[in-house]
Image (cartoon, grey):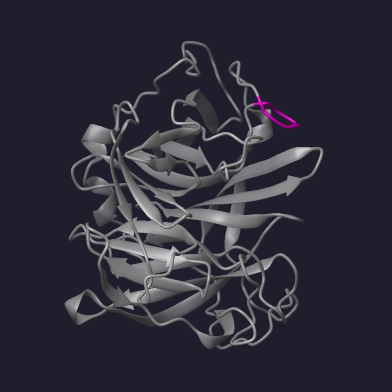
Amino acid sequence: MRLRTVLATLTAGLAAAATLTAAGPAQADARVNNACSPTVSIDRFSDILDKTTYDGTFVGNFSALALDRDGSLAALSDRSALFGLDARTLAPRKAVPLADENGAALDSEGLVIDQDGTRLITSETEPSVRRYSTDGKILDRLPVPASLLVAPAGRATVNQTFEGLTLLPGGRTLLASMEYAIAGDSTGIVRFQTWTRTKGDHFRLAAQYAYRTDTGLGVPEVQALPDGRLLVLERGFTSGVGNTVRLYLADPRHATDTSGVENLTGQDGVRLIKKTLLTDLVTCPSLGATAKQPQPNPLLDNIEGMVVTGYSKGHLKVLLVSDDNQNAAQTTRFYYLRVRV
């Protein structure tokens, strides 16, 4: 796959989103050096939306973020809803319900806002990728390789399928990341599936790549950068200990197309996606954050969504969000990072 060096979908809304600020009592001042690592620092965080409602809908369960064309922030709930948030204050402005072709709720996890404003959204249930209008109507459904379907139709495990979704540079190629390995592949080797845009803004199946996670971690999100590399979140949870969340820079440009490889063992000559650790978020300053359950750093929670909100000469502004699972022991928290790549 040839990756271009212009990320068309990133440019829309960056100017407005570059002024994103936290709001509410759980924000922190970034006037000191809030380094997490030599390449990552955290400006602030915000818990302002934790355990709130909007127009009768619970605000939370966030699994993905995206910039909309008007500069607002789109936040996807895994309970089959898409929220529009004010980019500066995070205040909800709208909530659009989502459903499958039969009206059933989705386990909605990955989000891309396409060049025409339509929404590409994954669901872990089958898994699937569907295109929706701004008011939640289904416009298209993308093909999925049989091996990536949930067993018994395929080799994937329920709730361990398409978590991340991103458009690669130029907007011609869509990439979805599986959260965990499928049956027959070695533990820790997950598949990244791509599609190529065709006439009429449909997508056909294209190359597939393999990525090795750290032990015990899965991939909840990926985001493409203008040079063809990816930001990859890895995440895990240990009861009584808390969350592990790591941010990697990954390069798929020289990886093997694994779409024809039945079993990935790590010993089969396949070139995996190369990755470089940017930071383990446990090393970030806590900024006065509190946790509702044991955490190795009280700043941490179940971080699942990520979007690049600004890019300039290798310096990124990155916004993360945690999925509180509508659980009293977890927090909906936004994290404002600066990343140097």
Q: Inspect this view and state whether residue 68 appears.
A: yes
Query: In x, y percent, where is residue 125?
Result: 53, 70
Residue at (68% x, 32% y) in the render = 282
Which of 151/179 is in front? 151
Which of 59/132 is in front? 59
Residue at (59% x, 57% y) in the render = 219
Dominant SS type (magenta)? loop
| Residue 52 left/right relative to 5 | right
Query: In x, y percent, where is residue 59?
Result: 43, 40
- Which residue lies most toward the front here? 56
Question: Does 295 lie within the magenta span?
Answer: yes
Q: Is residue 90 above or below residue 187?
A: above
Residue at (29% x, 55% y) in the render = 7
Q: Quadrant of the N terminus?
A: bottom left
Q: Which residues are magenta?
A: 291-298
Q: Is residue 122 above or below residue 64?
A: below
Q: Is residue 37 above or below residue 234?
A: above
